[in-house]
Amino acid sequence: MTTHPDELAGLTGLFSDQERAIADSVRALTTREVEPHVADWFERGEIDDPRGLMRKLGALGLLGMHLDGYGCAGTTATEYGVACLELEACDSGLRSMVSVEGSLAMFAIWKWASEEEKQRWLPGMAAGELIGCFGLTEPDHGSDPANMRTRARRDGDDWIIDGRKMWITNGSLADVAVIWAQTDDGVRGFAVPTETAGFRANTIKHKMSLRASVTAELVLDGVRVPDSAAFPEVRGLRGPLSCLSEARYGIVWGAMGAARTALECAQRYSVEREQFGRPIGGFQLTQQKLADMTLEYTKGVLLAVHLGRLKDAGALRPEQVSLGKLNNVREAIDICRTARTILGANGISLEYPVIRHANNLESVLTYEGTVEMHTLILGQKLTGQSAFQ
Ligand code: FAD
């Protein structure tokens, strides 16, 4: 008789009926639509019918779900977090698809675009009919976006944008790209229709992580957009950072989903697999691994719930999101790697979800601010000294 880690720590009791119902409906969708195919997608580095999948995610209200109006579900932040956990329990690529659509592209438009642009894009994006991406990173500027080279200049009533963006999730699927560019007035954001002349997206191949997710290079070569495409008020990195904070919050939760799947798999395997005439779960060394994984998983979920309740109270600060992202992704990858050892050679096979999650988390560790960047954010808060430069 085994006990599930959630039950052991009494985690399910932390959630309201509504939060549990959202978890159940997301899990039903992932079990039906993604789970049976995701190892194959990962192996091929290709998602079958990503547009159809986005529409199904939209139909369940998962896209921009914690935003109000424009066809968005308007849930609480904790409900959104619970959904992220369940999506990433299936695959980090799936959660990334939803995070980039809702927390990066839609949030940027919802928060910063003109009313006309909000009406133009948000209802279709919430329904999953239109796909968005978020272009901040460049080939030569990742952790240091302030020095980005992409530039937008005025030409009469229009803007002309030139530059390149790199590692852009959903990039070659997108109908609209949120592009951050230098202007004479500081960094500004633009909602760029991807059908505009001069805009090109090249899918990035040969990734060994987040393979069931579309990643692209964006090339903007004299892309002309009207002034209405520019976000009217926000200037400087405050714009993109506000969006990153939203997406990082989802990762705090999502990472624990990946960890849960790996932990469940290792636990099950430990009682079924026999060596030396007994289940490997009967050996103290295996039990120590399972106990440590359960501890870190439990602490990670508790931290996510704490940050979710703070966000719902309107009191969550960016450095607290950094704390959660840093801890939960770091611990999740550690849990996946330990789970991998419990599965022995089977641990490296896509027949089991563990190596897929471990590999995916390598990307999650780097995107939305690397471990080092979040460490420096905490260090700066703790000491009052910036160590970024
Ligand atoms: P660099 O910034 O070059 O960093 C390399 C190393 O140096 C890191 O370990 C870093 O922590 C360290 N480092 C840098 N500066 C310092 C310092 N001051 N002190 C100490 N260490 C330092 N970007 C988008 O804009 N949109 C997306 O949709 C998107 N999706 C992505 C999807 C995937 C699968 C991946 C892998 C990345 C994605 N990214 C996206 C890009 C991601 O955000 C960047 O990769 C990330 O910000 C790091 O930038 P970089 O890769 O250029 O690394």
Image (tube, helix red, strand yellow):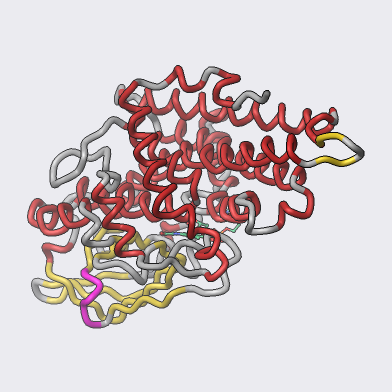
The residue depicted at 63 percent of the width and 58 percent of the height is 350
160 sits left or right of 306 in the view:
left
Number of marks present in the image shown: 0
Q: What x and y, as percent, mark residue 66?
A: 27, 38
151 drawn magenta: no
Residue 15 image point, x, y percent: 40, 22
Q: Depth check: 297 or 10 in front?
A: 10
Q: Is residue 196 magenta?
A: yes
Of all residues, the one furthest to the right in this rendering is: 276
- Going by the image, does 354 lie left or right of 131? right
Image coords of residue 216 (percent x, y): 43, 70
**Residue 221 position in % (x across, y down):** 30, 81
What range is drawn magenta here? 193-197
Name the residue at 52% across, 31% down: 384
Which of the 4 image quarters holds residue 180?
bottom left
Which part of the image, by quadrant, shows the N terminus? top right
Between 137 and 270, the one lying in front of the other is 270
The answer, for residue 373, to whether it is visible in the render is: yes
Q: Residue at x 15, y 76 (%)?
A: 155
Whether residue 375 is visible here, answered yes or no, is no
Where 126 falls versus 210 (above or below)?
Answer: above
Relative to 358, 154 lies left or right: left
Q: Is residue 165 left or right of residue 346?
A: left
Q: 314 above or below 187?
A: above
Residue at (36, 62) in percent of width and height: 135
Most prominent secondary structure in the magenta stretch?
A: loop
In this view, the residue in front, 274 or 313, is 274
34 or 361, which lies in front? 34
Within the image, what quadrant is residue 51 found in?
bottom left
